[in-house]
Image (spheres, rainbow, N blue to C red):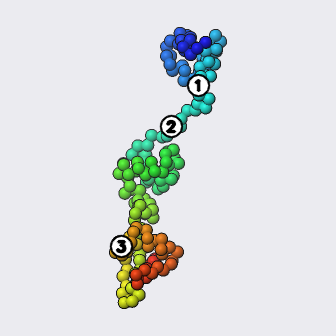
Amino acid sequence: MNITEAVNAILKRYPDYGYDIFLDLNEIKDDDLQEAVRFIAGMRRRCHTEPKRSQKNNRETLKDMIKKRYSYKDIAKATGLTESTVGRKVSDYGLKRLYHQMHPYVCPPGIRPGVRMICLNIETGEQKIFSSMNKAEKAFWFREGYLRDKTKGGKCYIENGWEFRRGD
């Protein structure tokens, strides 16, 4: 028996179903078609599994989850999506501001709030206080994240006659 004969035998017996009957071959109970069923089942891939369906997430579902103070990680677990996909969807739906209102201690990327920098000129005694590390880095022409790395753990950093300390 070849594949054409097996398919035609099954379709001749079940003309109303069309190709839907091939989705679940266990529904075919006729004894004379068991050879065709075994042949088609043998042709299929050995590790055939149904793909997991992720829940269709619309704007209202995400908005409700954000209002219940779900984090991106919690939303990802509940919906079956990845965290990056959840973040993208929240951004696409315009819910990013709401998310950061509900999670005030979660900082948006690129912003480091609340970490003041105290910069002291060792030679002249001049002192500058910046409201954020980012502003201090820009004022002294450092790359982004440079002072964060150098002053981590309460350390003091000295460069070009200036002493940099966190003002926590």
Residue 45 seen from this side: yes
Q: Earlier in the sequence, mark 3 or mark 2?
A: 2
> Is residue 20 shown left or right of residue 104?
right
Can residue 14 be seen? no
Along the polypeptide, which appears first: circle 2 or circle 1? 1
Image location of residue 75, percent across then percent down: 49, 50
Q: What amino acid does circle 2 point to?
A: Arg
Q: Which mark is residue 44?
A: 1
The secondary element bearing badge 3 is classed as loop
- In the image, what residue occupies the spot 49% across and 45% down? 81
Q: Which residue is mark 2?
A: 53
**Residue at horizontal 48%, vertical 71%?**
149
Q: In this picture, is 49 found above or below 99?
A: above
Q: Identify the residue at image location x=62%, y=29%.
A: 46
Q: Residues within 10 Å of mark 2 (few under 14, many from 20)?
A: few
The image position of residue 155, as x and y in percent, is 50, 78
